[in-house]
Amino acid sequence: MTNICKGDLYHPKWRPNSSILLAVERNIAKHPYKSKSMENLLVLTDFSLHAKHAAEYAYSVAKKIGANLILCNAVIVPAEMPQAGLVVWPMEESSVLEEASSSELEKLKEHLKKIDESHDKKPQIGIVKQSGYLQDVVNGLLADDLADLVVMGTHAEGFGSFIVGNHVRTMIEAVDVPLLLVPSKVKIAPFKNIYFASDLSDPHGDSAFLKQIIPLASAFKAEVFIAHISTPASIADDISQKTKAMILDFSSELGYPGIHFIRINEQNAVDGLNKLMAKAPMDLLVMVHREKSFFKNLLKGSHTEKLTKDLDFPMLIFKAESQPLHIA
């Protein structure tokens, strides 16, 4: 049985908890939000149609939040890859690959400029091409502090194949900055409802990532829903009181009036997430990848196969830092 704690301004079936909203509004002045903004979006492309769509999507987000774009293509030069073995590739062919990459990046850059016919301030667009594996190229750029968010597209439709295919799992594991995954079915439209799905096993950590969402939500004037995916094994006797106190703490600390809470109880996290995705009118799903969390379990093939939703919304993934080992 699904238990949804009500709270939504846009959907009359879920009405906001007035006491929580009032607490949030009172605390805006006391707790002004301060955080590093997402100033540079690194957009990965292989020049496919779904990558082009992701770039268009990233452009619309960047324009709304006042960020800039970096279009990136990882050039696979066979002679530089370990599996190339003893095969000798002429330098001329490597140059052709790199020139083709530069040409396609310029075309994509001009395409993004052309489709924006408004007179509003436009994002600046840079391009970068490097030879190597995708995750190595991306991590090299991130090491130089060139991007605050990575964007990539996927052609997979189901949630399960979406999470494990098209370099996605590799990027989830490798990238330390937020990763925005854009399915090909996603329509380019403003965020109205942002859902942060969590088992709330680390409230302090979740609060830190929620802080990073608030500037994005504020730019779009979006509602933020903290969705607690709970199971019988994770529910304590005093969960209601703990949850109420936790949400009030979140609201007070974040200082954003459009924060709501829902709880979905199912036999397991996969069923809970399926229920959330099926019922909630979301424009963005946010989750945290940490060593011990239900999202970590979702990366296992046996679990992702049970996720049935065809994705028509993007997914933003934060990666938590690994906890250091304490040796007594």
Image (spheres, helix red, strand yellow):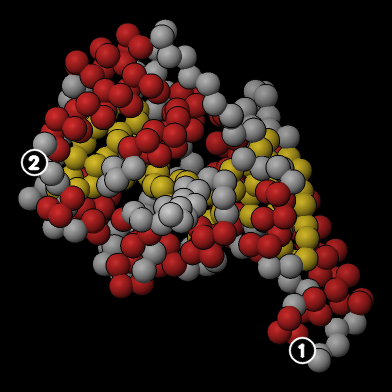
Residue 35 vertical placement versus 83 (above, below): above
Give 145 or 100, whichever is nearer the viewer: 145
Q: Is residue 187 above or below residue 173?
A: above
Give the secondary structure at mark 2: loop
Residue 311 position by quadrant: bottom left
Q: Which residue is mark 1?
A: 85
Task: Tell me the amino acid under the disc marked 2.
Answer: Asp
Q: Tell me what residue is drawn at x 40 percent, y 44 percent.
A: 286
Q: Residue pushed farthest front?
A: 328
Question: Residue at 51% across / 60% down in the picture?
Answer: 173
Q: Earlier in the sequence, mark 1 or mark 2?
A: 1
In the rendered structure, the answer to whether residue 143 lies left or right of residue 236 reads right
- Name above or below for residue 174 compared with residue 148: below
Give the quarter of the image for residue 245: top left
Q: Residue furthest bottom?
A: 86
Q: Nearer the viewer, residue 190 or 244?
A: 244
Q: Pointer 2: what residue?
A: 237
Name the spot of residue 129 as percent of width and height, x first: 78, 57
